Amino acid sequence: MTNPLRRIWAKGGCVLNSFLSLPSGFSAEIMAGLGFDALTVDLQHGLADANGAIAMFQAVQGRPVAPMARVPANDAAAIGRVLDGGAVGVICPLVNTAPEAARFVAACRYPPQGGRSYGPARAVLAHGADYATAAAEEIVTFAMIETAEAMQNLDAIAATPGLDALYIGPADLTLGLTGRRHRIGFDREEPEMVQAILRIRDAAHAAGLRVALHCGGPDYARRARDWGFDMVTLSGDSRFLAEAARASVARFRDGGQ
């Protein structure tokens, strides 16, 4: 078993990730051929369920793309299902305290490092007979930092044994830190939010962790890479579809005037 994320990081690179919200193996297959390093099935806000996620993992197999999942909650059963289905990275939302981070990590690791139940099912087919041994070193665990409470506990969360990375959800983080004083969305420009984002970066790196930022557009993703982020998420399949369709319709309408 090898995880493309760890290979990229070992060479000093920045992982380019995107989200899959559409419950379609075909759309996942299209996204897998576009040059991303990782693709994350979004089980929190996307439309896929656990069975759909496995079909999407199958659709990207054979490509040099890391299949990942954002689980709907910090739940051992949900985490175990996506790992048994072949995910090599798990993003856990709303991790607000160190004990919550420890519970998340335990759900991703077999004993003695954690409490994951053994039954890798498809993961052995996808990643090889050494899966049970290699999983402890290869699977990447991302704890999402996206609330005011998480910011208060930032250093304690980052110190969690076995945690690999922090993942910034800028939309929820902005809501949590500023309420409705700013627009909801990604690609934050407000000085207070940029400061918070860089503080999370620094806390992650000080603890020896990787750090990821969810971005809306390529220019901001490049900026995040230049800030030293180890992974950037560039939009997602449903947004790409909407943006391309909107641009084509607008060009047709404008060209017909």
Image (cartoon, rainbow, N blue to C red):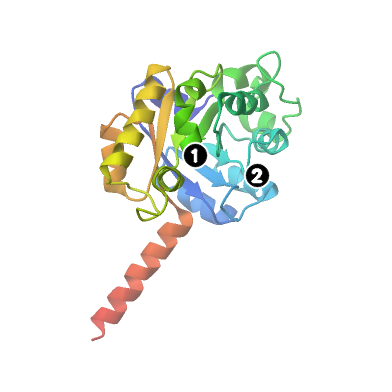
- Asked if residue 45 lies left or right of residue 195, the reply is right
Q: Quadrant of the C terminus?
A: bottom left
Find numbered disc 1 in the image and state the secondary structure of the residue it sits on. Answer: loop
Q: Quadrant of the N terminus?
A: top right
Rendered location of residue 36, percent (x, y): 41, 42
Rendered location of residue 158, percent (x, y): 48, 22
Look at mark 2 in the image and give the residue it sits on: 54
Callout 2 crowding tier (Cα within 10 Å): few <14, some 14–19, many ≥20: many
Q: Farthest residue toward the bottom? A: 257
Of 185 and 124, the residue lying toward us = 185
Callout 1 crowding tier (Cα within 10 Å): few <14, some 14–19, many ≥20: some
The relative height of residue 50 versus residue 12 in the rendered view (above or below) is: below
The relative height of residue 33 versus residue 201 in the rendered view (above or below) is: below
- Asked if residue 216 lies left or right of residue 38, the reply is left
Of 149 and 46, the residue lying toward us = 149
Rendered location of residue 202, percent (x, y): 35, 24
* Residue sitting at x 55%, y 16%: 161
Look at mark 1 in the image and give the residue it sits on: 63
Rendered location of residue 56, percent (x, y): 59, 47
As shown in the figure, which amino acid type bears the numbered disc 1? Arg
Q: Farthest residue toward the top? A: 112
As shown in the figure, which amino acid type bears the numbered disc 2? Ile
Residue 91 visible in the current orientation: yes
- Asked if residue 78 lies left or right of residue 222, the reply is right
Find numbered disc 2 in the image and state the secondary structure of the residue it sits on. Answer: helix
- Ranked by sequence position, the earlier of labels 2 and 1 is 2
Residue 32 visible in the current orientation: no
Of 205 and 250, the residue lying toward us = 205
* Residue sitting at x 43%, y 58%: 239
